Image (cartoon, helix red, strand yellow):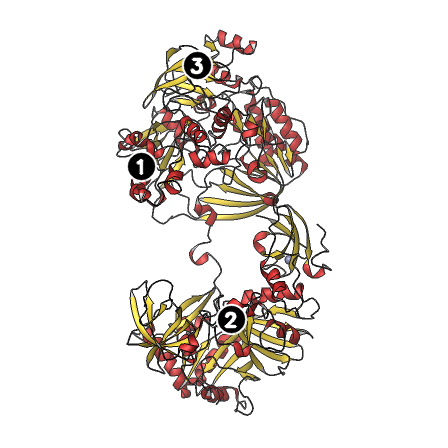
């Protein structure tokens, strides 16, 4: 089990969260009409071995979506942020 | 083997005598004994039959590493398989039986498995499932026979009468193990004021100190240390508890065998407790496990680990044999050898080494022990008990160099070195480091928040273990000081554990993995067949894959493979360990979370009324909902048909409190809804409702429901019962990430509102009578809402129909749900009001052709379900691009139709559809999604998804239920079975 630091609630058990996948994916603009952009956003993911930025939803806590920096190899968590406070989802949370 | 209890000594309570049973025979024991020590004291040396070959097996160890002595415990509904006799505390009336033997342990028919050896050798499973025998039926034929012959204990099929608890705990430091290192660490950390959880699998503290002779100098220190720890309020001591799992972020799983040492748990007490401990740091003091040697007959009862022989002698006062051959490659076996001699045994030591420290040589000489240097046991002889050994001079590779001598004995005490018990460390961090001088894998002393101390860290003396523990705990207070025997196994160890003839073979079966019956020859065969990596070796031979996870076998298998490949052990590598360290009962992990307690049950605030009025309830996700209200003697079919017909003729009410409800508020809510739903929401006026369809990002339908606009910036969304959580999570995700420009807040208000649907031609009359409000068609048309009072409760009335009748939904502050329901029931008598359940609700919506969860099941698009008209072409929305993927636009996709079943039997949901004259094979051209008897149409109808469905209206097709072997015929019709123009609901 992981324990994840929620900026609102503090250090909490993984069981309070749901996983939300790669947090570096940038959702295309609503007006984007090219299916390829949407296919990339919805289906195409890297499977990195090592540092990863990912969404976790504090479902049974404050209901905030977090961006968590987790190493997929060691499970080490090196930072967590409120998604709504990260200026640019793709770039801001430095690796 | 002629074991016996000594007249004095040991750490057992001789003032009390208890009795334990094994295979119906009664044995005398004392509190402090294990089942194993009691059986050994009573001369029972045959305890088990081996996994594959049904060879006689006795005790090899005295602790957690015991591979042979697995027994059944207790009987009836407390029957328990695969208990290690060495880990079972003896209690009066303890019943145990042998397992994996038939008809008896003594005369086991399965021993002929020796003849079936070819099926049981290495790679059997590989060859059967992926090799040339794959698909030949070979496995089918042999499976039953093999499963019966090869196996462990049998579990009971009866319900477990005991209960189990889960405990969440937090601490500053978790210490696993209460040997000298663990206790020293706990003392220092405890004195420092840290919150300590100290875990010991034994029922007493002390670890290896308990293997010293009773009255040893360490006993005084031990009792003082324990007293000091018990006085510290910040130290929690958990004995009979195993730290079985080390998980990420310093989380540990423990299992406390709280009431396993009594016949049945005392009233109100749990049998076991599962602890989930979150700690800031961990100190592992889990000790080391002695390593057996590999030679022919090394599994014969009477071949034991030297440390186990010592433990039986000093802790339980059981002398395991009179004539003992001690076989070693290191110093640590000399202490037991000397103690055995002192206790009256005749001892021969054969040591692989040509030189040993002078001090040791002196002491064995004084004790009149026959010391044979440069020699090893090539073979242990005997069937159900060891009768002798064949001892040979060996070279530096463990190969015999000359003829040997036969030595008569009844006990062989073996030490092939030691393996630090690094399982918890490895679970967390993976591969440890090989130390050539110790011929062992060790964890680094420090990694992350883990410190390893004592024998686990290769401590060379008792004093070093204490010092390491003291330092790990924080060096508070005086460092403990104790002297122990100078017999460190790692000092001059000769790293050879496999003893063979000059040609490298063994004169008989020599076991590497005892619990899975993996022989040295199996490792050799794996090598010959190319399975040389450790991971392949493990899976091909199944070495290390038994319940003991290879506690005594891993290193010897590795060592053999390293020799065959001409490599060093580090180049061959090692496997990693997984939780649990020792088996954990499923009951302990489940705790109370089973049956009705698996998760919370959600109840509407009207629930009690339903129960009082004899409703049959049905689970809907976590909710319980009224399914139908049977009249006397009525079954479900009779009830739902009556209820549905009643709604179309009079008026009915149904509890719809379980619908998901979301308050969406803020200046940009209209834009938010416009993006979330496929249809337009910007034009929705205050006081109006709109049905909406919502897609996933991939273009498939996610959910549908009505949204009400309550105020300028205030909207009330409803979702289906099943998808409420999913819709809210997606809304939150979009608003907190991609749509942060929108000023919108979403909050679940499902639990804040009870909801009742009122449907039927008399619904307006009833509501007018109850509310005294003007609810005329002109004042409150369809898709409008009004604020009303019912029984003085302010409610919101939505005019909206799901049944196709004139209908309303009443939203009530949750706490007043029942009050309003009862007010409706009371006022409903003149209108012949009746409650109805979900089954009738389903019948009504199928008649009307409305889709529900059986159609919105994650694989259907708006086009598939005939909802295309709701999709706005003027704006983008979630899924609007991907729903247009060519594959989803294919007209051959199954699409929604109605079916009128021909004949008097209804179709089963899930039935497959085939054309009338085609073959009924494969997956068909579609499937039945929802099915009901329609009281309005007086026939069996169904909703179905059929390839090119709308183009096939009028066609007759076959409806096949392969599970029930039912084939029907049906006419394809429009899914709007009833009142397609909507006159009734708009009236
Ligand atoms: Zn939180």
The answer to whether residue B117 is left or right of residue B575 is left
The answer to whether residue B382 is left or right of residue B710 is left
Question: Same chain for marks 3 and 2?
Answer: yes
Mark toward the start of the polypeptide (2 vs 1): 1
> For numbered disc 1, what is the local secondary structure?
helix
- What crowding class fits label 3: few (fewer than 14 Cα within 10 Å), some (14-19), or many (20 or more)? many
- Which residue is the site of mark 2? B889
The verdict on label 3 being within 8 Å of ligand 1 is no
- Name the front one of labels 2 and 1: 2
* Nearer to the camera, A5 or B952: B952
The verdict on label 2 being within 8 Å of ligand 1 is no
Depicted A25 relative to depicted B749: above or below: above
The answer to whether residue A63 is left or right of residue B505 is right
Residue A58 rendering spot, x and y as whole percentages: 61, 58
Mark toward the start of the polypeptide (3 vs 2): 3
- Which residue is the site of mark 1? B149
- Name the front one of labels 3 and 1: 3
- Name the front one of labels 3 and 2: 2
> Badge 3 sits on which subunit?
B
Question: Same chain for marks 3 and 1?
Answer: yes
- How many angstroms separate mark 2 from mark 1 (CA)? 57 Å
- What crowding class fits label 2: few (fewer than 14 Cα within 10 Å), some (14-19), or many (20 or more)? few
- How many angstroms separate mark 3 from mark 1 (CA)? 36 Å
The verdict on label 1 being within 8 Å of ligand 1 is no
- Which residue is the site of mark 3? B400
> Badge 2 sits on which subunit?
B
Residue B422 rendering spot, x and y as whole percentages: 55, 33
Name the quadrant containing residue B663: bottom right
Q: Which mark is residue B738?
A: none
- How many angstroms separate mark 3 from mark 2 (CA)? 78 Å
């Amino acid at each position: 089990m992981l324990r994840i630091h929620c900026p609102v609630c503090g250090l909490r058990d993984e069981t309070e969260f749901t996983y939300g996948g790669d947090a570096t994916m940038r959702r295309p603009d609503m007006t984007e009409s090219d299916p390829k952009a949407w296919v990339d956003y919805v289906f195409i993911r890297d499977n990195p071995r090592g540092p990863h930025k990912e969404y976790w939803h504090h479902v049974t806590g404050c209901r905030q979506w977090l961006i968590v920096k987790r190493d997929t190899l060691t499970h080490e968590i090196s930072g967590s942020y409120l998604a709504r406070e990260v200026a640019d989802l793709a770039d801001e949370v430095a690796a | 083997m002629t074991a016996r209890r000594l007249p004095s000594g040991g750490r057992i309570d001789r003032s009390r005598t208890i009795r334990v049973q094994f295979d119906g025979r009664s044995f005398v024991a004392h509190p402090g004994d294990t089942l194993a020590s009691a059986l050994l004291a009573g001369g029972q040396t045959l305890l088990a039959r081996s996994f594959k070959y049904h060879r006689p097996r006795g005790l090899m160890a005295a602790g957690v590493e015991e591979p042979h002595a697995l027994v059944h415990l207790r009987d009836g509904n407390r029957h328990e398989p695969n208990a290690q006799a060495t880990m079972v505390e003896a209690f009066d009336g303890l019943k145990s039986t042998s397992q994996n033997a038939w008809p008896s342990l003594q005369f086991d028919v399965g021993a002929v498995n020796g003849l079936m050896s070819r099926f049981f050798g290495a790679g059997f499973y590989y060859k059967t499932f992926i090799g040339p025998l794959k698909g030949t039926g070979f496995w089918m034929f042999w499976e039953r026979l093999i499963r019966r012959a090869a196996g462990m204990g049998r579990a009971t099929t009866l319900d477990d009468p005991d209960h189990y608890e889960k405990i969440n705990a937090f601490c500053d430091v978790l210490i696993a193990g209460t040997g000298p290192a663990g206790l020293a660490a706990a003392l220092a950390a405890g004195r420092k004021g840290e919150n300590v959880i100290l875990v010991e699998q034994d029922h007493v503290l002390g670890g290896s100190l308990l293997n010293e002779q009773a009255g040893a100098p360490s006993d005084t220190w031990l009792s003082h240390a324990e007293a000091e720890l018990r006085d510290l309020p910040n130290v929690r001591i958990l004995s009979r508890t195993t730290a079985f799992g080390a998980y990420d972020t310093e989380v540990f799983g423990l299992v406390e065998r709280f009431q396993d040492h009594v016949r049945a748990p005392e009233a109100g007490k749990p049998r076991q407790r599962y602890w989930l401990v979150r700690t800031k740091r961990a100190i592992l003091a889990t000790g080391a496990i002695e390593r057996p040697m590999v030679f022919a007959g090394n599994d014969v009862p009477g071949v034991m680990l030297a440390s186990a022989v010592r433990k039986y002698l000093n802790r339980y006062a059981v002398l395991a044999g009179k004539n003992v051959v001690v076989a070693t490659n290191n110093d640590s076996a000399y202490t037991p050898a000397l103690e055995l001699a002192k206790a009256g045994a005749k001892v021969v030591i054969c040591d692989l080494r040509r030189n040993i420290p002078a001090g040791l040589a002196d002491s064995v000489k004084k004790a009149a022990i026959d010391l044979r240097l440069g020699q090893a046991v090539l073979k242990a002889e005997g069937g159900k008990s060891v009768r002798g050994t064949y001892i040979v001079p060996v070279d530096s590779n463990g190969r015999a160099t000359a003829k040997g001598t036969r030595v008569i004995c009844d006990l062989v005490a073996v030490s092939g070195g030691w393996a630090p018990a690094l399982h918890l460390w490895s679970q967390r961090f993976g591969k440890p480091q090989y130390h050539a001088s110790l011929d062992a894998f060790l964890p680094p002393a420090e990694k992350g928040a883990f410190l390893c101390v004592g024998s686990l860290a290769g401590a060379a003396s008792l004093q070093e273990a204490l010092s390491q523990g003291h330092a790990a705990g924080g060096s508070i207070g005086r460092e403990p000081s104790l002297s122990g025997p100078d017999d460190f196994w790692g000092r001059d160890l000769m790293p050879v554990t496999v003893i063979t003839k000059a040609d490298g073979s063994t004169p008989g079966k020599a076991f590497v993995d005892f619990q899975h019956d993996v022989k040295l020859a199996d490792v050799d065969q794996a090598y010959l067949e190319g399975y040389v990596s450790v991971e392949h070796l493990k899976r091909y031979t199944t070495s290390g894959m038994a319940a003991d996870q290879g506690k005594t076998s891993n290193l010897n298998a590795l060592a053999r493979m390293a020799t065959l490949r001409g490599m060093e052990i580090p180049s061959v590598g090692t496997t990693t360990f997984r939780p649990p360290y020792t088996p954990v009962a499923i009951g302990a992990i489940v705790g109370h979370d089973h049956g009705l307690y698996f998760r919370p049950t959600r109840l509407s605030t009207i629930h009690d009324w339903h129960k009082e009025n004899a409703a049959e309830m049905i689970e809907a996700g976590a909710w319980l909902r009224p399914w139908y209200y049977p009249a006397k003697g009525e079954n479900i079919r009779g009830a739902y048909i009556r209820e549905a017909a009643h709604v179309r003729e009079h008026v009915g009410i149904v509890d719809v409190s379980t619908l998901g409800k979301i308050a969406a508020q803020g200046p940009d809510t209209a834009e938010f809804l416009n993006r979330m739903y496929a249809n337009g929401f910007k034009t929705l006026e205050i006081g109006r409702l709109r049905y909406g369809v919502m897609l996933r990002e991939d273009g498939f339908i996610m959910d549908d429901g009505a949204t009400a606009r309550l105020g300028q910036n205030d909207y009330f969304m409803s979702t289906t019962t099943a998808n409420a959580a999913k819709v809210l999570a997606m809304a939150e995700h979009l608003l907190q990430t991609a749509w942060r420009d929108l000023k919108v807040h979403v909050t679940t208000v499902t639990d804040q509102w009870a909801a009742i649907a009122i449907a039927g031609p008399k619904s307006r009359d009833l509501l007018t009578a109850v509310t005294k409000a003007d609810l005329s068609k002109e004042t409150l048309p369809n898709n409008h809402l009004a604020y009303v009072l019912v029984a003085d409760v302010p409610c919101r009335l939505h005019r909206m129909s799901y049944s196709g009748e004139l209908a309303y939904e009443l939203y009530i502050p949750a706490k007043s749900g029942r009050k309003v329901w009862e007010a409706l029931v009371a006022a409903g008598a003149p209108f012949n009001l009746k409650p109805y359940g979900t089954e009738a609700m389903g019948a009504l919506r199928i008649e009307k052709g409305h889709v529900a969860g059986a159609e919105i099941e994650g694989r259907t698009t708006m086009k598939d379900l005939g909802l295309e008209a709701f999709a706005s072409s003027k704006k983008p929305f979630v899924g609007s691009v991907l729903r247009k993927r060519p594959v989803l636009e294919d007209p051959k996709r199954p699409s929604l139709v109605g079916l009128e079943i021909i004949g008097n039997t209804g179709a089963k949901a899930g039935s497959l559809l085939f054309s009338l004259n085609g073959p009924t094979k494969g997956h068909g051209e579609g499937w039945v999604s929802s099915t009901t008897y329609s009281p309005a149409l007086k026939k069996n109808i169904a909703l179905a998804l059929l390839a090119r469905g709308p183009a096939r209206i009028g066609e007759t097709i076959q409806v096949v239920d392969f599970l029930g072997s039912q084939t029907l015929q049906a006419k394809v019709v429009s899914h709007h079975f009833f009142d397609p123009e909507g006159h009734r609901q708009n009236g």
